[in-house]
Amino acid sequence: MLAYIGLGSNLNNPKQQIKDALIALNSMQDVKVVALSSLYQSKPIDNSKQPDYINAVCEVDTHLSALELLYVCQAIETKQHRVREKKWGARTIDLD
């Protein structure tokens, strides 16, 4: 099954955070990254005083269910020290 995952970061070297998340995704036994968009810089959605985001989208081939893939993404976020304090807040990594 093909799935698409959005990646975003605006803390602690965002380009490296995205690279690390892609490596983590690709290292999973049941997930293979097959395509990656360019990196894009964007302003925070609420115009708050936080750094710009770096965003990308990857296409993965997986046998995992949507829920299992969500758990994989959340585990990667946790490993990369994602803290959920504020909606639309700054983050080390966001995988959707």
Image (cartoon, grey):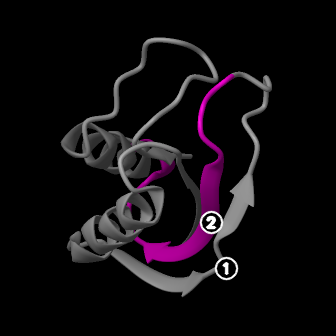
* Local SS, label 1: loop
Q: CA distance from mark 2 to mark 1?
A: 6 Å
Q: Within 10 Å of the Cα at label 2, are there few (<14), some (14-19), or many (20+) other Cα atoms?
A: some
- Residue 16 or 68: which is nearer the viewer? 16
Residue 65 vs 77, above or below: the answer is: below
Sooner in the amino-acid sequence: mark 2 or mark 1: 1
**Residue 62 part of the magenta segment:** yes
Question: Residue 29 occupies which quadrant of the picture?
Answer: bottom left
Please state the extent of the stretch shown in magenta in the rendering. Answer: 49-67
Residue 83 marker: none
In reply to whether residue 74 is colored magenta, the answer given is no
Q: Quadrant of residue 93?
A: top left
- Across and down, in percent, residue 25 comes to 33, 67
Residue 38's disc number = 1
For disc 2, the marked residue is 56
On the image, the x and y values in percent for residue 28 come to 23, 69
Looking at the image, residue 27 sits to the left or right of residue 50; the answer is: left
Residue 48: image location, x then y, percent: 71, 22
Front residue (pair 32, 19) = 19
The amino acid at mark 1 is Ser
Query: 59 above or below 13?
Result: below
Contact? badges 2 and 1 (CB < 8 Å): yes
Asked which secondary structure carries label 2, the reply is strand
Q: Amino acid at mark 2?
A: Ala
- Residue found 59% across the figure and 39% down from its top: 51
The image quadrant where one finds the N terminus is bottom right
Judged left or right of residue 56, residue 84 is left
Q: Residue furthest top?
A: 85
